Amino acid sequence: MKVIKGLLLALLAVVVVVGGYLAFFFDLNSFKGPIADKVKQVTGRDLVIDGDIGWSLYPTLGLDLAKIQLGNLPGENLPPLLSVDQASVGVALLPLLSRELQVEELAVSGVRLELVTLPDGRSSLTGLGGDKPAETQPDEGSKPQTAPSGPKHWVLGHLAVNDLTIHNDNRAAGADQTVAIKQLELARIEPERAAPLRLEIEVGDGDLAVATQAEAMLTVSADFSRFQIDDWRQQLTAQGSAVGKQPLKLGLAWDADLDLARQHFKVANLELKLADFVMTGEAQADLAGVRPSFVLKAKGNHLNLDPWLPPAESADESKPDTAPTPKDGPQEEPDLSAMKLMDLDADLHLGALQARGVLAENLALKVRLKEGVLTLEKASGKAFGGQLTANASLDGTVTPARYRFDNRIEHLAIQPMLQALADVDLLAGTGAFHLKGQGEGLTGKAMNQLTASGGLSLQDGAVYGVNVAQMIREAEAKLKGDLQTQVVEQKTDFSTFSTELKIKDGTLATPNLEIASPLLRISGDGKVAIEPQTLDYALTVSLVGSLEGQGGKGVDELKDIPIPLTVSGPVTDLQFGLDTDALLKGKLDQEKEKLEEKLKDKLMEKLGNF
């Protein structure tokens, strides 16, 4: 017993002597030069440690570093790639003897990461790695070395990251973004035991500033292969010109199971809140396949986006002071290669969606992205008084991209749709619209590659901007020498309106246009240039009823005389022209026919007397 006690005292004396020696005579600051040399060899960048290197031995094996800087791209006048104001780590010494790792504290503060991309394409990460030594092959006779076994148990007492800033200065693309992690705190975590997590992040790029705070309970497996996040609660605030005048305040909640070994992630109890809008759902991701695959199912109530949309430009504001000079050469197609990097199945339902005054209700969307092809398998909803159904696809595996679509709206009120989507008050009426087509290319000039066909039929409506009956009345009066005009509402009522729709070579053609009312019949065809939006129509008007009650005196003597009517000009300033020469010729022909009929009747009457 005395022998054992003596050995313990001797061992304690050795520890005290060694500890005293290290404390008084061993200075880690003398290793700054060798450390910087080794970092230079590994990274190719200069390391500067301006602060003192502090350390402790017992009861906690600790290390403190201050004022650390790692150089950026060599030969360029750039801020340091990495700078750290303070970093410290402390590990309990005695548990290491039993292969237990107890990190008492890991704290980092004042960290800034500067990522710069120069106009020539070089970035802060270019050449990061330095001069790597050549790999040596092991001797055939040597025994394979076994990796040292890890700790049987580990504990992280406290993790604190404060004021971590990531600045991305992309001078090649003209983009500048900053992500600031104000606080990341994790209190005492060990395997299979939930620990509280707190996170605070700020993001800004000039047009948009985002601040978010989150809290959750985090559980980690002993081998770090599985993470479980319970009761995640996050608040996000976004403001700036990109979200309009009113700040966007978003609440997010979910639970997650992250299986790193199987590369399978599942999110349950997903809940998103934005003002009065609430969306619930679930999601999962599988990263073990050829491409990552994601599945999302969500359902929400009424979402009104108007408070966070930037104000729409007026017609005057949208016009530039001088016409832009068109650029020579073909326009560049967007890069859709990212569509081939993942698969997606999404099933979304919304009670209502409102944006810029347009209200759509009972929306259902089923979207699928697989092997670079995005397919809208089903879209349905109610809008503008009608029922919308649609399907479409976009093939991003080829350049230019190919697309197809098939849209149909039944019981459509066309006037509010034109006012909301095109700010045009041209047509009124209720009916059906359908359009099916395909094309390739997503640039403005690629509209010439769009081919589509469909139809539009309306009932009990009106064409605004022209009163065809009044035009005929005034034209007939002028032929009689009456130059007086009457002020009447500029619209032409109809009982039915129908036309075919054909899109080709950047032009919308409307063959077999037929407009009918108890008074008029209008037929013909025409074209609408999609860019710029101009019309060119040649129509024929025929009177089939009395014009009494249409704002003036009757001109029934013009019945059944075909009258040419032209419509041309930009959509916002249409010009209507009635061919008075043809009207006069038609009237003369009509009178000539009447006279011939009278002469024929009289001749037959005289011949009958013989």
Image: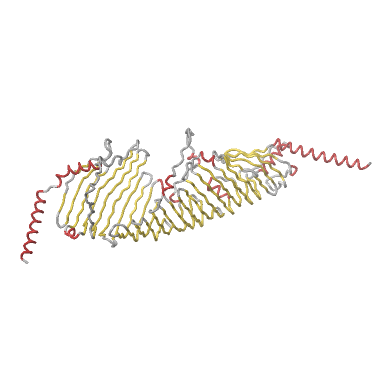
**Which quarter of the rendered picture does the C terminus lie within?**
top right
* Colour basis: secondary structure
Q: Residue furthest bottom?
A: 1
> Toward the viewer: 553 or 432?
432
Picture coordinates of residue 146 (x, y %)?
A: 23, 54
- Quadrant in the picture for residue 385: bottom right
Is 478 left or right of 36, judged from the image as shown?
right
Picture coordinates of residue 166 (x, y %)?
A: 30, 46
Picture coordinates of residue 443 (x, y %)?
A: 49, 40
Q: Residue at x 46, y 40 (%)?
A: 333
Is 225 left or right of 271, judged from the image as shown?
left
Picture coordinates of residue 321 (x, y %)?
A: 47, 35
> Toward the viewer: 496 or 402?
402
Q: Residue at x 21, y 45 (%)?
A: 67
Relative height, residue 201 to residue 123 (above, below): below
Q: Residue furthest right?
A: 610
- Quadrant in the picture for residue 154: bottom left
**Which quarter of the rendered picture does the N terminus lie within?**
bottom left
Q: Is residue 244 visible?
A: no
Disc count in the image? 0
Is 231 left or right of 136, judged from the image as shown?
right
Q: Is residue 91 visible?
A: yes
